[in-house]
Image: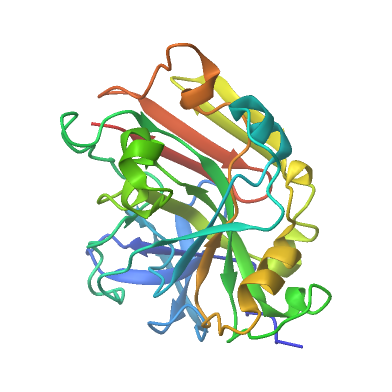
Amino acid sequence: MASSPQWKSIIRFKDSNGQVLYGEPLGDDLKKATVFEGDDILSLTKSDKVVEVGEVLAPYVPDTILCIGLNYKEHATEGGFSLPKHPVVFHRQVEEKLVPSNAQSKNSITGPYATIHMPPESHAGSIDYENELCFVISRDAKNVSAEDAPDYILGYAVGNDVSSRTWQAPDMCGGQFSYAKNFDSFCPIGPAIVSSKTVGDPQNLKITTRRAEKVVQSSNTSDMIFGIYDILSFLSQGTTVPAGSLVMTGTPPGVAMFASSPPNFLKSGEVVECEIEKLGKLRNEFL
């Protein structure tokens, strides 16, 4: 069994001097944090320093991002899809491993309160939100059973799997989702990673998305087709899922693609909030 981290939740942030640090927040408002030393989310050491939190960044930038599509029963129903017989897997690309001294992402990962810059409508329009439960792998996982999967999960975070539906259309994507997902800043995560011990059962978490303060997604992770532990077991069969990998686990019903006819996709100036019980809330403006 993997050892638990020294923290219950961990954030990555800039302090008042612009230094990028890891820390355990002292309250839900994320105004102060106990500093944890180190550059690797998997091996941080608690210090005795408490500092003011400035800008909250993505809690870390993973080397590997694995994503599961069509994983909520009601989401499959709203789209008119049959339930998949096995997890639908795609990847988000990672261009550069970033340590805390280099806070700017050069891939789709971005912060929980960062602005998301939409690509030109002429190239990649029909931008949509997807609130998703994410988990972080604590150690290399290969041929892991669902029963043993909890021992490989460091913690959980909220993610928005922002998508260009233009590039998910069958005649545009050839059945591959990755290009639609990998535009810069299309994957805000955070605001913290909350330890698996703190979260407890990941299959009973309320998940809510608000668009311009109106609830557009309201569900529970109990509606997943493939649960967290089954997903990790599936991904690890014959393949090593590296320590530090981020896994995104699909979105519930209520995405703009299926909420109205014709769809009312995101417009410049709109704000989307993605919230998951026990994990916190993302709030991102789209421009």
| Residue 160 sits above or below residue 155 on the image | above
Where residue 41 appears, as percent x and y from the top left, is: 47, 77
Q: Work out which quarter of the rendered image holds the N terminus and state it.
A: bottom right
Q: Nearer the viewer, residue 127 or 201?
A: 127
* Point 69% across, 84% down: residue: 143
Q: Nearer the viewer, residue 119 or 80?
A: 80
Q: How many marks?
A: 0
| Residue 98 sits above or below residue 160 on the image | below
Q: Is any atom of residue 25 visible in this view?
A: no
In the rendered image, the residue lying farthest to the top is 261
Where residue 171 appears, as percent x and y from the top left, is: 34, 37
* Colour scheme: rainbow
Q: Is any atom of residue 1 visible in this view?
A: yes
Where residue 198 appears, as percent x and y from the top left, is: 73, 63
| Residue 33 sits above or below residue 55 on the image | below
* Point 61% across, 33% down: residue: 208
Residue 153, image quadrant: bottom right
151 on left or right of 51: right
* Point 22% across, 39% down: residue: 117
127 on left or right of 96: right
Q: Work out which quarter of the rendered image holds the C terminus and state it.
A: top left
| Residue 163 sits above or below residue 87 on the image | above
Residue 277, image quadrant: top right
Where residue 49 appears, as percent x and y from the top left, is: 45, 76
* Point 41% across, 52% down: residue: 176
